[in-house]
Amino acid sequence: MQGRRRRWRWQGCSRRAVRFLEPTLLLLLHHGPAHGYTLLERLGEFGLGRVNPSVVYRALREMEGRGWVTSYWDEEQAQGPPRRVYRLTALGDEALALWTQDLEQTRQLIDHLLGAYRRHMEEGEGEHH
Amino acid sequence: MQGRRRRWRWQGCSRRAVRFLEPTLLLLLHHGPAHGYTLLERLGEFGLGRVNPSVVYRALREMEGRGWVTSYWDEEQAQGPPRRVYRLTALGDEALALWTQDLEQTRQLIDHLLGAYRRHMEEGEGEHH
DNA sequence: TCTGACTATTGACAAATTGCACATAGTGTG
DNA sequence: CACACTATGTGCAATTTGTCAATAGTCAGA
């Protein structure tokens, strides 16, 4: 069952990042409407600095498809091309609440796993297998 | 930008922010060699009860491909078809350590996000948007 | 011995997700 | 005009996941 041993990159990280993307966007939008580009920049505060712009815009459009946000073109265009403004909806508010519940649950699972790991390491101390 | 509004299902753990399957399997194997089926059953202890058997076996084979585990057919077949025994390797041990680091990091991200959420909720108290 | 139930593992394929490269578009600068 | 910078969007290949079904051995009972 070897062969095909394609490089193991810690690409789990990127997966993880993406699942944080939606709750993070919802949270940022909970502060008030914002442009996609602005959101993109603020993602860094939550450890999502390396997310590809395409991914963010796509996520926003999908969130719009689910009714979590609405968007419209910014009339007063400052500098640069027209920008789209995203605004959280009531549904998006609920989604955010659900996401936080989910994250809390996830955190518990992590704690459980890490707890089991540490406990096992302490009692085992090298004589395992 | 609507249409195509395909049902948003919270469909289960699989969409979770983190991949628990691999670290959990590694941890279980850290206790000692085990059959795939046994691992499958014990996953429930870590909240991974609904994972499809195929997914677990596939994960095990991939972990073998990366050198994290080795496997062999169980000679003394008790009851039922031949069973494969998986055993953690030294590399798997390292992988487990890395995974726990990764999980700790992930937990921090979750805490950060949840913290920001709660802080915002407290100060805002309904007059947002 | 035929049948069905249970234990184990695997394969194949469709569906969903992601990364990446590029397209479009406006504005300001030299 | 050429170029850089800001902003958004599209298309597609590659990867990952979910689901269904196939295979296979043992055991219990009619």
Image (spheres, coloured by chain):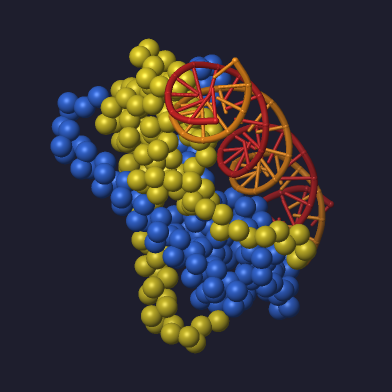
Chain colours: A blue, B yellow, C orange, D red
**Number of numbered discs:** 0
Residue C26, given in percent of the width and then of the height, sits at 77, 66
From the viewer's perspective, is D27 left or right of A122? right
Asked if B19 appears above or below B121 in the picture, the reply is: above
- Residue at image x 66%, y 70%? A67
Residue B80, image x, y percentages: 45, 22
Q: Is residue A84 left or right of residue B124?
A: right
Q: Which of A16 and C12 is in front in this view?
A: C12
Does A126 sit left or right of A11 as displayed? left
Can residue B109 be seen at all in this image of the molecule? no
* Residue B88: x %, y % from top left: 33, 25
Q: Which quarter of the rendering shows the N terminus of chain B? A: bottom right
Q: Which of B85 and B16 is in front in this view?
A: B85
Answer with the quarter of the image where residue A87 lies: bottom right
Residue beneath the point at 71% across and 78% down? A76
In which quadrant of the rendered image does the C terminus of chain B lie? bottom right
